[in-house]
Image (spheres, helix red, strand yellow):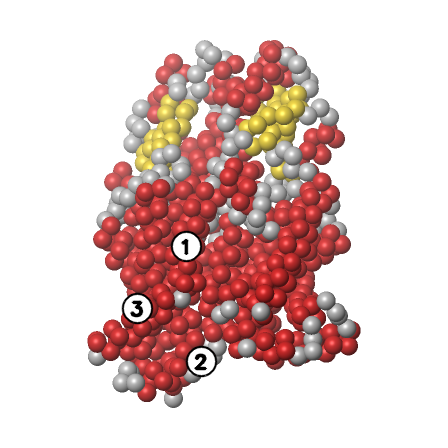
C-alpha cells in the first residue's frame, strides 16, 4: 500500500477530466437527486384532504342534512348525497368515492329521544388501502363528535363529554408528510447516487478493460481506488448539499441540527455507498448484472426497509434484524432527527457508529475483492 | 418472417438464461423482495413504546394506565418528570407520552371536566396519526365506562369492504406485482438493445434478413416473457404464502398483464433506442423508474398528490396496473373500471413502441 502524492494528483486530474467529459456522472449526481426529491416530496403524501364520501339518506330531514353539512365542512371530507344505494355502491366499487355513509330512516327520531339512543349511522369504507381507510374513519368520527358538541345541551351531555384527550405533536406539529418524507428521500438519493456513480461507471471500465490497463500502470491499487473514490466522494457531497438546500427552500422542511453532524453522517454514508458500488461492479464484471444488482440493492430497500416510509418498530422482529444490514436506516434516523428535532446525540452517535462500521466493512471487502480479481 | 423472429427470441432468451448471474438476478431477487417488503410495508402499529407520566395515584388514573398497558398497540413504561419525558421522546426511547394530571381521579369522581395529554413524536407523522387514534379510542372507551348507565346518543358503525381486517399486505402485494414486473421488463428490454448497439452487434443483426421492426419484436418478447414470469411468481407467493384472496378473473389479470408488459418494454426499448450506450440506457431507467413507482400510488394515494403531480402521473403505466391488480385481487371489479385502466395502458404501449421503432430506424440510417 504505497501512496505517492504525485501519482495521486495525476490520477485525480484524470478522474476529473473523465467526469467532465462523460455527462453520466453529472446526471447521476445532480439531475437524479432533483427528480427524486421533487417526485417523492410531492408524490408521497399521507395528508388526505377532501376524501369523497357518498351519503345515502333514507329520510332527509333538517337535523340529518345539518349533520351532512357539518361533515362536508371538514377540510378532510367531501360529502355528497348519492342518488341511490345502488349508485353509491357502484361509485365505491369504481373507486370514485372512498366511503358510503348510510343514515337509516329511523335515525333522526332515535337521535331526538334519549330513550332510543344510540342512533346508529353506518360507514362503509373501501379498505383496499387500509391506511387511508383508518384515516377516513377517524375523520368521520371526529367530525361527528364536533357536530354533536354543537347541538343542544342534551346531546352534549353524553358520556365521555367530560373527559377529553389533548393531543400534541412534537417536532412536526402539523403532521406534514413532507417534513418526515423529505429527510428520508435525501437518504434514498444518497444511496442511489453513491452506489450508481461507482457501480455503473466502473463496471463499464471493467467491461472495456480500461481498468486492467490502469492497474498495469505504476499506480498502486490503493492510489487508484483512492483517486476514484475521492472524486466521486466530492461529487456525492455536492449532490447531498444540493438536496438539503432543495429540501429547505422548496419544501420548507426545517433544519434544526448542526451542519457538522450532517457532514459527518453524509461523509460516512457516502464512503459506504461508493465502496459498495465499487464492490458490485467488481464482482459483477458486466454492466448488465452490475446495474441490476445496484438497482435491486439500493432503490427498493432504501425505500422499504430504511424507515423512510414504514416504521421499523412496527415490522416483525426477524425483519427488524434484517434492517440492521441496510445502512440507509441509520442515515434516515440521523437525518429525520437533524431536520426535525436537532442535535439529539443519543440518536445520532449510535447511528454514526453503525455507519462507520458499514463504511469500514464495505471498504475492506472492496479492497479484498479487487485484489483477488486480478489474480 | 415468424421463423426469423422466433429464432431471434430464442437467441435472446438463451442469452439471458445461460449466464448464471443473469439467471439469478431474474429469478431470486423478486421473490426475496416480495417477502421482505410485504412484511415491511405495515401501517399497523403494535407494541409502540409509550411513556406514562402519571401524576395522580387515584384508582381512575391507575385504571386508565391499565387499559393502555393492556392494549396490543402500546408497551407502557413509566416516566416521572417533565425532563425525563422530553429526553425519552427526543431519543426515540418512547414514541409518545401520556400525561395524567394530578387531580384527574378527583375531577372525574366529582363530575368535573378533565383531560389527559398525549404527546406524540411526529417525526414519523404517519405513525403519530395512528397512535393518536388508538389512544383516542382507549380514552373514549374508558370515559364511556365511567357512566355505565348512560348510552351515547350516536354510534358510527364502520364496515371495511374488500379488506375487512385491514391487512396491510393485501394492499402492498398486488402493488408489488405491478412494480417489480415493470422494473424487470424495463431493465431487460432497455439493456438488450443498448448492449447490441454498444458492442456493434446491432449492425450485424441488421445485415441479416431481419428487418428493423422484426429486430424490435425479437427484443421486446423476452422482456415481456421475463416480466410475466416475475409477475406470476409474485402472484403465487401472494396467494400461497400470504393467503391473499383472489376475487376477480385470473384470465383477465393475465390478459392485462400482457398489455402492461407491452407498455413496459415499450418504455425500455424507447429509452435504449435513444441512448447511445448501455450506461445511458441504464441511467434512463433509473431516472424514470423511481418516479414511476412513487407516482403510481404504490405507497400513498394518488388523490393526495398536488394536481400537477397527479396529472404527470397519468402517463405512468404502473398507476393503471396498480388499480387493476388491487381490484382484481380484492374485489371483482366492474368491467367499466377495467376498461378505464386498459385504454391508457394500450395508448402508452402504442406511443412508446412507436417511438422505439422510429428511433431504432433513425439509429440505423
Residue matched to label 2: B199
Question: In front of the other: label 1 or label 3?
Answer: 1
Mark 3 neighbour class, 10 Å CA radius: few under 14, some 14 to 19, many 20 or more:
many
Q: Chain of mark 2?
A: B
Above or below, A324 relative to A164: below
Horizontal side of residue A333 vs B221, given as left or right = right
Question: In front of the other: label 2 or label 3?
Answer: 2
Q: Chain of mark 1?
A: B
Residue matched to label 1: B28
The answer to which quarter of the image holds residue B266 is bottom left
Which x, y percent locates residue B102?
68, 18
Give the position of the C terminus of chain A as an image quadrant: bottom right
Which x, y percent locates residue B297?
43, 52
Q: Earlier in the sequence, mark 2 or mark 3?
A: 2
The local secondary structure at tag 2 comes to helix
Q: Earlier in the sequence, mark 1 or mark 3?
A: 1
Spatial distance from mark 2 to mark 3, Cα to Cα?
21 Å
Residue matched to label 3: B221
Q: Are marks 1 and 3 on the same chain?
A: yes
The local secondary structure at tag 1 comes to helix
Which x, y percent locates residue B268?
40, 69
Amino acid at each position: 500500500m504505497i501512496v505517492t502524492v504525485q501519482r495521486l494528483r495525476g490520477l485525480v486530474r484524470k478522474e476529473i477530466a473523465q467526469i467532465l467529459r462523460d455527462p453520466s456522472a453529472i446526471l447521476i449526481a445532480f439531475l437524479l437527486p432533483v427528480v427524486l426529491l421533487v417526485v417523492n416530496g410531492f408524490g408521497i403524501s399521507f395528508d388526505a384532504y377532501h376524501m369523497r364520501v357518498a351519503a345515502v339518506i333514507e329520510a332527509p330531514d333538517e337535523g340529518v342534512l345539518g349533520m351532512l353539512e357539518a361533515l362536508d365542512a371538514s377540510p378532510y371530507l367531501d360529502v355528497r348525497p348519492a342518488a341511490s344505494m345502488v349508485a353509491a355502491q357502484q361509485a365505491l366499487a369504481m373507486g370514485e368515492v372512498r366511503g358510503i355513509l348510510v343514515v337509516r330512516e329511523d335515525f333522526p327520531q332515535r337521535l331526538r329521544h334519549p330513550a332510543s339512543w344510540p342512533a346508529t349511522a353506518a360507514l362503509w369504507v373501501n379498505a383496499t388501502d387500509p391506511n387511508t381507510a383508518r384515516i377516513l374513519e377517524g375523520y368521520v368520527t371526529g367530525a361527528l363528535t364536533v357536530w354533536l358538541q354543537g347541538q343542544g345541551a342534551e346531546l352534549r351531555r353524553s358520556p365521555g363529554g367530560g373527559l377529553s384527550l389533548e393531543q400534541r405533536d412534537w417536532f412536526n406539529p402539523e403532521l406534514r408528510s413532507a417534513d418526515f418524507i423529505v429527510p428520508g428521500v435525501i437518504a434514498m438519493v444518497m444511496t442511489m447516487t453513491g452506489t450508481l456513480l461507482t457501480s455503473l461507471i466502473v463496471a463499464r471500465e471493467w467491461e472495456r478493460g480500461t481498468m486492467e490497463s490502469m492497474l498495469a500502470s505504476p499506480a498502486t491499487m490503493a492510489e487508484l481506488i483512492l483517486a476514484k473514490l475521492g472524486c466521486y466522494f466530492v461529487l456525492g457531497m455536492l449532490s447531498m448539499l444540493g438536496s438539503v438546500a432543495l429540501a429547505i427552500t422548496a419544501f420548507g422542511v426545517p433544519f434544526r441540527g448542526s451542519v457538522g453532524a450532517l457532514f459527518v453522517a453524509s461523509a460516512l454514508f457516502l464512503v459506504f455507498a461508493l465502496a459498495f458500488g465499487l464492490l458490485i461492479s467488481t464482482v459483477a464484471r458486466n454492466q448488465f448484472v452490475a446495474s441490476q444488482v445496484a438497482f435491486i440493492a439500493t432503490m427498493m430497500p432504501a425505500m422499504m426497509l430504511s424507515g423512510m416510509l414504514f416504521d421499523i418498530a412496527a415490522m416483525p422482529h426477524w425483519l427488524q434484524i434484517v434492517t440492521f444490514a441496510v445502512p440507509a436506516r441509520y442515515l434516515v434516523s440521523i437525518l429525520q432527527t437533524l431536520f426535525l428535532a436537532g442535535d439529539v446525540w443519543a440518536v445520532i452517535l449510535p447511528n454514526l457508529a453503525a455507519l462507520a462500521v458499514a463504511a469500514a466493512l464495505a471498504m475492506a471487502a472492496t479492497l479484498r475483492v479487487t485484489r483477488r480479481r486480478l489474480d | 418472417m415468424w421463423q426469423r423472429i422466433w429464432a431471434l427470441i430464442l437467441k435472446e432468451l438463451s442469452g439471458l438464461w445461460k449466464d448464471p448471474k443473469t439467471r439469478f438476478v431474474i429469478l431470486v431477487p423478486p421473490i426475496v423482495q416480495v417477502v421482505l417488503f410485504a412484511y415491511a410495508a405495515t401501517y399497523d402499529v403494535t407494541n409502540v413504546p409509550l411513556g406514562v407520566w402519571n401524576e395522580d395515584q387515584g384508582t381512575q388514573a391507575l385504571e386508565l394506565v391499565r387499559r393502555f398497558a393492556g392494549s396490543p398497540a402500546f408497551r407502557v413504561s413509566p416516566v416521572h418528570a417533565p425532563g425525563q419525558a422530553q429526553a425519552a421522546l427526543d431519543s426515540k426511547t418512547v414514541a409518545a407520552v401520556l400525561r395524567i394530571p394530578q387531580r384527574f381521579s378527583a375531577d372525574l369522581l366529582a363530575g368535573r371536566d378533565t383531560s389527559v395529554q398525549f404527546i406524540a413524536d411526529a417525526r414519523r407523522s404517519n405513525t403519530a396519526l395512528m397512535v393518536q387514534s388508538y389512544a383516542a379510542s382507549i380514552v373514549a372507551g374508558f370515559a364511556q365506562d365511567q357512566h355505565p348507565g348512560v348510552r351515547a346518543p350516536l354510534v358510527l358503525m364502520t364496515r371495511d369492504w374488500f379488506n375487512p381486517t385491514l391487512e396491510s399486505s393485501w394492499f402492498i402485494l398486488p402493488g408489488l406485482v405491478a412494480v417489480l414486473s415493470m422494473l424487470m421488463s424495463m431493465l431487460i428490454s432497455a439493456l438488450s438493445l443498448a448492449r447490441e448497439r454498444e458492442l456493434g452487434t446491432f449492425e450485424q443483426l441488421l445485415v441479416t434478413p431481419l428487418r428493423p421492426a422484426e429486430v424490435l419484436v425479437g427484443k421486446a418478447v423476452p422482456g415481456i416473457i421475463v416480466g410475466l414470469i416475475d409477475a406470476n411468481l409474485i402472484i403465487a407467493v401472494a396467494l400461497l404464502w400470504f393467503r391473499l384472496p383472489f376475487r376477480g378473473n385470473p384470465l383477465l389479470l393475465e390478459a392485462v398483464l400482457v398489455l402492461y408488459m407491452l407498455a413496459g418494454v415499450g418504455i425500455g426499448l424507447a429509452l435504449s433506442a435513444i441512448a447511445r450506450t448501455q450506461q445511458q440506457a441504464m441511467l434512463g431507467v433509473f431516472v424514470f423508474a423511481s418516479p414511476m413507482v412513487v407516482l403510481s400510488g404504490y405507497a400513498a394515494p394518488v388523490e393526495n398528490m398536488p394536481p400537477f403531480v397527479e396529472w404527470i402521473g397519468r402517463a405512468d403505466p404502473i398507476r393503471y396496473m396498480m388499480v387493476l391488480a388491487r381490484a382484481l385481487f380484492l374485489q371483482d371489479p366492474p368491467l367499466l373500471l377495467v376498461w378505464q385502466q386498459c385504454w391508457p395502458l394500450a395508448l402508452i404501449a402504442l406511443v412508446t413502441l412507436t417511438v422505439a421503432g422510429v428511433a431504432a430506424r433513425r439509429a440505423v440510417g
